[in-house]
Amino acid sequence: MSRRVLLLQGPVGPFFGDFARDLENRGYFVCKINFNGGDAFCYKGPNPIEFTGSSGEFPDFLRETIEKHGVERLYLFGDTRKHHEQAISVSREMGVRAFVFEEGYIRPDFITLEEWGVNARSDQPRDPAYFRRRPQPVARQCQKTAHVFVWTAIWAMVYYTASAMARKKYPHYHHHRPLGVLSETSRWFKGFIRKFWYGIKERKMLNHLVTEHSKKFFLVPLQVHCDGQVRHHSSFDSVFAFIEKVVESFAGHASESSVLVIKHHPLDRAYNEYTASIKMLERKYNLAGRLFYVHDLHLPTLLDHAAGTVVINSTVGLSSLWHGAPVKVLGEAVYNMPGLTSQLDLDKFWLHPGLVDTKLNAAYRAYLMETNQLNGSFYNRLSESNTVCGLKLDESFWKRHLSPSPEVLDQKTAVRARKLAT
């Protein structure tokens, strides 16, 4: 069994430090590469390694680190960051297995962990017939996770502050968000204010939608403006470009009795506000009384009453299917397959959203639960004492993630052969 692990960037906060210490307590050697001051401050685990070079220097640095420490497993958060894309490529080349953490496909009580990539880069089957053939799913017990927005915001501010203060030590590092101390703190403070303000402003909106427009409104959940899944796995160059396309299609092809509800992403509250832009679209397409922009309304309730959901590639699509609301995907999503999501053009979806195949959805959900969903949260540990970094990890996890795979063993043989040849 493999017992030498390398960590790259993790979620903001102490998650990777907890993961490293828990693995070390179970007899694993663990080291981690830090790319900026936030990584270094948040990681309190064993064997930190500092990388202060450019992205062009990183592949060779990673090869040397892997060889020096005999690394056999790589763990990282998100597969669209530049260093992580490079790392996955190097891992394949060297016969080292790479595992990617990401927010859960199933939320809120799970996180995702897949080999080589997640979402559009996942290697899970795309054929609905595969899931239809699977045995009936067995109920899985899971523990509820607490609300984590406050902790997410706190750790984000700590991370960005530490990154900004150590900028001179890591001169070549470029983050996917600005790393200014004052700008990040002010943004998150603004996010808190907006949360309370919209809570008051929209207090009657949920009741209005589920009573006056139940099964007549289409929900459009937005994604974070810097989401790598939007940038790398869709044709949209911005979230607003997605909004504009959806509103234009709705105005031209939806029934006059239909309503469009655009929901802001909670973690983008501190960064973006689309009220003025959506008002402009409302006037442009004459949608007064049929276009709503909301922020913190209870998502499961909205999904229970939605006629359908339109997403880029958000995992809200999976939640929508679970609540019985048909889904149209406009980007690349791992769950976008015939029978599970609508394959019609967006213009036709408004009038013919179809029905959710509940058996196929249950089979697909069971597959996710069995193969890549871990009960827990990046920001709040489960209370059970037998967890690793606050996650429930059963024996199948250790077998799947920390034992050799035939593919990688074959790759290692090829690597050794090349070395002997030279």
Image (cartoon, grey):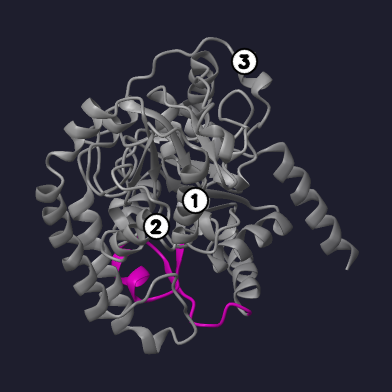
Local crowd size for mark 1, using a 10 Å CA cut-off: few (<14), some (14–19), many (≥20)? some
Q: Nearer the viewer, mark 3 or mark 2?
A: 2
Name the residue nearer the viewer: 275 or 234. Answer: 275
Q: CA distance from mark 3 to mark 2?
A: 42 Å
Q: Is residue 182 above or below residue 238?
A: below
Say which mark, if any, is on residue 174: none
Local crowd size for mark 2, using a 10 Å CA cut-off: few (<14), some (14–19), many (≥20)? some
Q: Amino acid at mark 3?
A: Arg
Q: Which residues are magenta?
A: 32-56
Q: Which residue is mark 3?
A: 132
Q: Quadrant of residue 257?
A: top left
Q: Is residue 334 visible?
A: no
Name the residue nearer the viewer: 376 or 414. Answer: 376
Q: Is residue 345 left or right of residue 254?
A: right
Q: Which quadrant holds the C terminus?
A: bottom right
Q: Amino acid at mark 2?
A: Leu
Magenta region includes residue 111: no
- State the SS at label 3: helix
Q: Amino acid at mark 1?
A: Glu
Local crowd size for mark 3, using a 10 Å CA cut-off: few (<14), some (14–19), many (≥20)? some
Q: Are marks 3 and 2 in contact (CB under 8 Å)?
A: no
Label located before the other in sequence (3 or 2): 3
Q: CA distance from mark 1 to mark 3?
A: 36 Å
Q: CA distance from mark 2 to mark 1?
A: 8 Å
Q: Which residue is mark 1?
A: 248
Q: Which residue is mark 2?
A: 281
- State the SS at label 1: helix
Q: Is residue 192 above or below residue 323?
A: below
Label located before the other in sequence (1 or 3): 3
Q: Are marks 1 and 3 in contact (CB under 8 Å)?
A: no
Q: Residue at x 44, y 35 (%)?
A: 309
Q: Measured from the top left, where is residue 138 in percent x and y?
A: 45, 12
